[in-house]
Image (cartoon, rainbow, N blue to C red):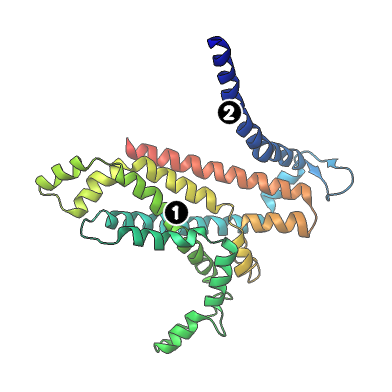
Amino acid sequence: MLKRENKYKLILIYAMVLIPFLIYLFIVIFPLLVSIIYSFSRWNGVGDKVYIGLENYKYLLQDRNFWLATTNTMIIAAYCVIGQVGIALIISFLMTNRRLRFKEFHRTVIFFPVVLAPVVIGFIWKFIYNSNYGLLNAFLSIIGKKDWILPWLDDTNIILTTVSIPVVWQYIGLYLVILMSAIMSVPTEIYECAEIDGANGFKKSLYITLPMIWDTLKIAIILCAAGTMKIYDHIYVLTNGGPGRASSVLTLYCFDTTFRIGNFGYGATISVGILVFSLSISGAIQLLMGRRKQ
């Protein structure tokens, strides 16, 4: 009887593991393999696919629009890593201050934008940036800084900075929660010993907190950089890649190529390129921050 119960429990365990694995296989692995297969073909979405080997990849390496979108994506990713993780790290250090009151309220307010849909964030900031009736230009006019008024969504010189700000603003709270959970796991005895030795708040953050949460910080940076590689909603709502292609990113270029132009084969090639860049960035961060820890 006992062996039968153990057998049922073992079957249940395997079933509990197998079900999410099959879901992951169907949602992630299978579409990835299909995209790789499509990338070796010429196909417009209907009819038979024509196998063309590496022709799509050869064209990809020479495609100026692809490399422009890649450059724009990398710049936005750099802004997001510095802005999201950097600001979240500073706020996390400030949250460890015992004199700070209403910490739960501050965390809730900062985290609130994370729960909003990116499309909603895009429309909110599009209204803020509007050249005619936007809140930003109206505020600058009220405080007497009319010379600071700019066409925020139409100036190619500032467009990447402009579209990065809403993304940074939305996800600071996410990385704040991640880093705060790591900081809260640091034993308080270490801080007490440091205070006895005369360490101030800055030294405790630099020489105790930062080394103790280094692995979590590395994961946060990888999540931020890799996540920015698939940014789409904010850019689509704010500029749709404009003016011209000044704010075009990889996901937007992939969508336009696949569904607007109807080149499913080359669109799959672009998606494979996005995957390669994401893995490369994650590996580089892992390598650099791993060496720093050592």
- Placement of 198 over or under 122, stated as above or below: above
Most extreme residue toward the front, as rendered?
A: 1
Amino acid at dot 1:
Leu
Residue 223, position in %: x, y?
48, 47
Left or right of 280 in this view: 294: left
- Placement of 67 over or under 208, stated as above or below: below
Tell me the quadrant of the picture where the N terminus can be found. top right
Residue 196, position in %: x, y?
10, 45
Residue 48, position in %: x, y?
89, 43
Task: State the residue at coordinates (21%, 49%).
Answer: 204
Q: Disc 2 marks which residue?
A: 17
Q: Disc 1 marks which residue?
A: 174
Tell me the quadrant of the picture where the C terminus can be found. top left
For marks 2 and 1, the one nearer the N-term is 2
Is residue 156 visible in the rendered image? The answer is: no
- Placement of 12 over or under 78, stated as above or below: above
Residue 11, position in %: x, y?
60, 20
Task: State the residue at coordinates (56%, 56%).
Answer: 73
Is residue 261 visible in the rendered image? The answer is: yes
